[in-house]
Image (spheres, rainbow, N blue to C red):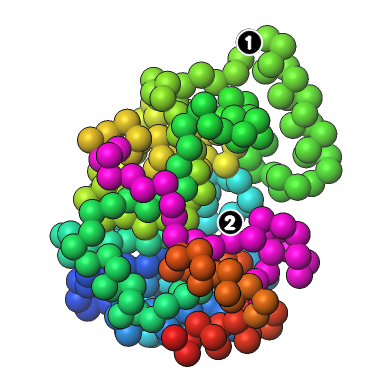
Amino acid sequence: MVVYVNTREYTVMITEARNQSFIMTAYKDSDNLYRLVERLRSDFNVFIHIDSSSTVLGEKDLNRLNQLRGVMATSTYAITWGSYKHLLALIDLAREACKWTIDGGYLHFISGQDYPVYSNQHIKDFFSDNKKIYMDYRDLSHMESHQKKFFQYKNHLWRFNYWNKLVHAVRNVDNWIQRSFGLLNDNIGGIRDIAQGLVWMSMPKEPMQYVLDYVRNNSRFMHDVYQLQVPEEFVFQTILGNSHFKNDIEPNNLRYADWHRRNGSLPAYLDESDYDKILESGCLFARKIDSAISAKLINHFEAR
């Protein structure tokens, strides 16, 4: 297979459809990225987008990754937190991954800062003959106030760094104007039953293809999505929550995370002290992982 990244041609070593595929976005920590890819590619196809604005990963990594059997790597979008570009990267990869995943197989969204808790065989067995959609999922009535704001307020500043203090101040003014003049969103593309959740999820190929077809055929929906804050957290949940796949949704994305600031990060960079809690959670994947801070933890995972 041949792919083009910024007009450059790469021959990709994906030669067969497999039961499961991993869709990954990455921008840092090359050590964990390569360890993760090597762990997965022996049993799964792996599709990777590298943030084109990354100062850590670049063309040399595209060359290296695309020489690995079972791997396709691209670098199309410069991604800022909460922007539309991350959603586009995931959709592009998912379209390609569906071509190389057998009917009835599974697709998984992960980041380059994730790691499997169990063996590849355990993952294969868990999703065998399974139809459930494992995702973080909450409807409007269960959203926290900040999650509702991501949907209600149009994000006119999506091109800019979300965490920049000046951008934050301008956004507050923009939000006040929208609130004061009755400009808040109450639907996405005509859908009023909105659902939200983290984008890291696992689902069968069929509902994934349903979402991809929906966004391709509903330009009004995507126009509205374009204006959301953190749009990736609304698209899959809202579309599937309003489809015949709704009853297949299991509101558990099987990803362990510690939502406290620790080890210099929120969510926390996990370390060896988290091992027992991760096992007790029943989750199949853990995040966030740092190749140095999480080294002993990863060794525990690898030993299982």
Q: Amino acid at mark 2?
A: Ala
Dominant SS type (magenta): loop
Residue stretch in magenta: 245-271
Q: Secondary structure at mark 2?
A: loop
Report if residue 110 is visible in the image: no
Query: As drawn, is 164 to the left or to the right of 138?
Result: right
Image quarter where the C terminus lies is bottom left
Q: Secondary structure at mark 1?
A: loop
In front: mark 2 or mark 1? 1
Name the residue that disc number 1 marks: 182
Location of residue 244 with respect to 88 vertically, above or below: above
Which residue in the rendered view is the most extreme toward the left?
103
Q: Find residue 189 and report its image quarter.
A: top left
Numbered tag placed on residue 214 in the rendering: none
Magenta-drawn stretch contains 179: no
Q: Spatial distance from mark 2 to mark 1, Cα to Cα?
A: 33 Å
Classed neighbour count for the residue bearing mark 1: other residues with Cα under 10 Å, few (<14), some (14–19), many (≥20):
few
Magenta-drawn stretch contains 260: yes
Q: Amino acid at mark 1?
A: Gly
Query: As drawn, is 180 to the left or to the right of 219?
Result: right
Location of residue 74 with respect to 206 vertically, above or below: below
Q: Find residue 146 and report its image quarter.
A: top right
Residue drawn at x 63%, y 50% as measured from the top left: 81
Name the residue that disc number 2 marks: 78
